[in-house]
Amino acid sequence: MTNIHSTAAQMSAALAAKEISSVELTQQHLDRISAVDGDVHAFLYVDTEGALAQAKAADELRASGKEISPLTGVPLALKDVLAQKGVPTTCGSKMLEGWRPPYDSTVVTKLKEAGVVILGKTNMDEFAMGSSTENSAYGPTHNPWDLTRIPGGSGGGSAAALAAFEAPLAIGTDTGGSIRQPAAVTGTVGVKPTYGGVSRYGLVAFSSSLDQAGPCARTVLDTALLHEVIAGHDERDSTSINQLVPQVVAAAKKLDVKGMKIGVVKELSGEGYQSGVSQRFQESLDLLVEAGAEIVEVSCPNFEYALAAYYLIAPSEASSNLARFDSMRYGIRIGDDGTVGAEEVMRRTRHLGFGPEVKRRIILGTYALSSGYYDAYYGSAQKVRTLLKQDYERAFEKADVLVSPTCPTTAFKIGEKSDDPLAMYLNDVATIPVNMAGIGGMSLPCGLAPEDGLPVGFQIMSPVMQDDRLYRVGATLEAALLSKWGKPLLANAPELAVR
Amino acid sequence: MPMNYEQATAAYEPTLGLEVHVELNTKSKMFCSCATEFGAEPNTQTCPVCLGLPGSLPVVNAMAIESTILIGLALNCSIAPFSRFARKNYFYPDMPKNFQTSQYDEPICVDGYLDVEIETDEGPKTFRVDIERVHMEEDTGKSLHVGGSTGRIHGAEYSLLDYNRAGIPLVEIVTRIVPGTGKYAPLVARAYVTELRDILRSLGVSDVKMEQGSLRCDVNLSLAPIGSDKLGTRSETKNVNSLRSVERAVSGEFVRQANRLESGERIVQETRHFLEESGETRPGRSKETAEDYRYFPEPDLVPVTPDADWIEELRKSLPEKPSLRRKRLQEEWNVPAKEMESMVNAELLDVVEETVKLGADATRARSWWLGEVSRLANEKEVAPTTLINANQVAEVIALIVTGELTDKLARQVVEGVINGEGTPREVIDKRGLKVVSDDSALMIAIEAAIAAQPDTAERVRGGNLPAAGALIGAVMKATGGQADAAKVRELLLKHLGQS
């Protein structure tokens, strides 16, 4: 019998076999959310009525005998950065408090078309800026493995919802690691598809040239099923790639890596990486070798500049993208007391509406784009981007996929790095190059670090529009780990208090 | 005593520069599918994209690109194989995103020219105006500042915003500096804008209505003492909304600057507003402290890379240059330059040409369109071509030529057609306007007239031809004015042995 601990694929099968209805399945998850989310705080908004209505429609669709998606009727948690018509969308910011978009993002349209049930909107760092979800204007999300720890960020809400069994599927967005790093520290799976693989229409932009929405779940196959629902060309997004979606579900079922060359990126190891992280990563490589893969070492010498370049490009684009939040047309308005002009109202609203990290990045970006500094900062950062792409191209000549630990460390304590933005930024050192080059990346759990018993993430990287390779390698490693452990990693997580 | 225009031009040499903004007449906006109709209810032609709602993304209008390339080709520009949009960042409530998407350092058309001819004291002279660039951008919304004395946002009680115009495709055509125009600077400026307007009209890419703002001109002018090789400080005059205003703005600014320089004051680099009533300019925004727009390439759009074959196809499709066409038609029709000018200014050249092509002689075609039809159109305050078409006018003219209609009857026919009474034939039938051309019927009337005035008839027989007028008048009266007077005269004189 299926329950909230089942995989999405199992839920799909149970729905197909009429063992459970989508309404029942959805209600189970809504009950779970109300039982545990007081402690976890994965959700900013739970759309109880909307979800049940969608579930009912999904059941009717199934009963009609029409062709349906494998995920019809399966519930999902949506990161609050994606527009859903009529449902509050805050991006974790005070600025958008109360805003209900009059339109659906393309990702939401595709989910609705597939009959996926959207439970609600998940917590995130304000405008996706952060690695811990502590920058949410609505309070942090807690890691289900240890409620005193961060669930990663910016998509900590989506990852925590999966780890807390509040939803079997979730949507995240990844600008510098916001899908993969939360997946790593919560023992879940997350994929950042190739840039342009999933439409950005309706994704509230942080950094347009880096942002990418992607699928999150507890298994590689579930992630693949969701990937195929949301991916594909969209004429509303000029940067979306007009090509067939890679066959990721088939790849996730292949469970065969014989003859594949797996490149270990030399620069993403060693100093700064927690010993338990390196140990679990190494063990996973051994499992892949046992499965028939060949390990090669590759060097990406320009990766050392990736973080610095990222922190010029992303804030630059953000400073422009976030200019529209001026209180004139939507969102909150502060200080419009009739005595001051529009400019002053904009200033007051932006002063109180944005949190400190968002302001920090707006200031950084504004500075980097300023006349006289543009070439030295934004211009140089773009050159680094080209070099990073070349590093990857050369590495992919030697290997089919590249791998690394997803993050240097396991989940840190809430508050631990709040006053040290640089330490926080370093958390994304291994995930950022993927965004800078626009390639695909996956994180899947590869064990618990012996020193703290917390999940470790294994990152796989694939060339542009070869996302199927992520799933092929990921699913093979997942199967090997599962047979070694005898049970899923999340089975080791502590029971959450039910209230 | 302040200097007048003659004194100013005797002492100073002007350097002219012109920036023309053209609203394209594409059906949809630059980056979304909203309608572009002029004069719709405020904020009815908007969507998430042109309102800059969070998450929305632009998509370039292919028709706008085609129109811009056509403009570039008609202005002898090179078409860039690779051009990009950039973001121009500044805050203003009528800009939904607080940045304008505009081409910046990589425009689509560069390095063209336009030759314009003006009348000088020494006869016609051609000036070459070099075109620096032609680029695409989006228009902003419209603000209406209510209350306050200046009509500007500062000091206004409140402001109204209409975003219908936000996102309308604009093309900006920028000249290089035009040196050596001397006292003819105002005429050169006017001739340039006139010729440009005619070209745009012939391409069919814009309504080019200066009074509706679909063609807007900024005039840049600087002065230097004659013989000096230095350029002076320039001012930029905006709000120049008619061809006549272009001329007046240049001459007005010429005199203002000359007087300032003469009295030892310096010219401030600033934006000035043209005042229609006085022909003077008043200061606007100072440009002494350069505003930093923090331009950077628009990451939401892919570069514009028009296919070379397509460009050649467009080049082949270019219509005849308006200046050449005017020369050709002037020769073919043998009309004075002034007449040509009035046809062009009344926007009737096309329809007159069409009427001529349908068999009418040029003189009649011209005089009907500029005369009776225009008079009726003025009364109704509409364009002449909305009342009657070339076919109908050509038919009326043919009936005059064959003698079936007199000019007087023809006017009634035209009036009938305009009143919606049907085709010229139908009007003639319904109103019974046919000329009495049956000789025997006329002869009866002629004989009756002779019988009534035997003395007069005798004088005509005796060679006093002017006396025939009284008899002709009697015949015309008898036939209710429907006879062709020339015909009556011919028959009468013949009958009285005088032809």
Image (cartoon, coloured by chain):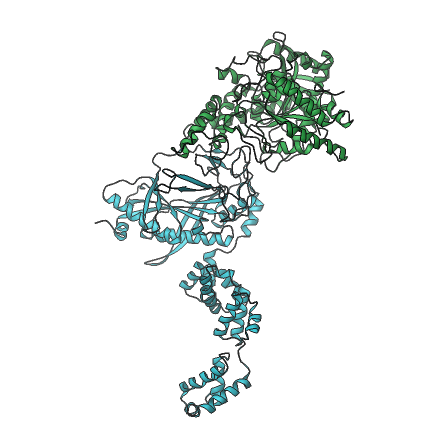
- Colour of chain B in the image: cyan
- In this view, the residue in front, B225 or A233, is A233
Where is residue A379? Give x, y as percent: 47, 28
Whether residue A188 is situated above or below residue A118 in the rendered picture:
above
State which quadrant residue A452 falls in: top right
Where is residue A216? Give x, y as percent: 64, 23
- The structure residue drawn at horizontal position 40% and vertical position 55%, both measured from the top left corner, is B117
Q: In screen coordinates, is A103 left or right of A251?
A: left
State which quadrant residue A220 falls in: top right
Whether residue A410 is situated above or below residue B37 in the rendered picture:
above
- Colour of chain A in the image: green
Q: Report the residue that reaches farthest toward the top.
A: A451
- Report the quarter where the N terminus of chain A lies: top right
Where is residue A262? Give x, y as percent: 66, 19
- Report the quarter where the C terminus of chain A lies: top right
Q: In screen coordinates, is A5 left or right of A333?
A: right
Whether residue B256 is situated above or below residue A479 in the rendered picture:
below
Q: Report the residue that reaches farthest toward the right.
A: A17
Number of labels in the image equals: 0
State which quadrant residue B426 falls in: bottom right
Where is residue A221? Give x, y as percent: 71, 23
Q: In screen coordinates, is B302 left or right of A262?
A: left
- The structure residue drawn at horizontal position 50% and vertical position 23%, both measured from the top left corner, is A311
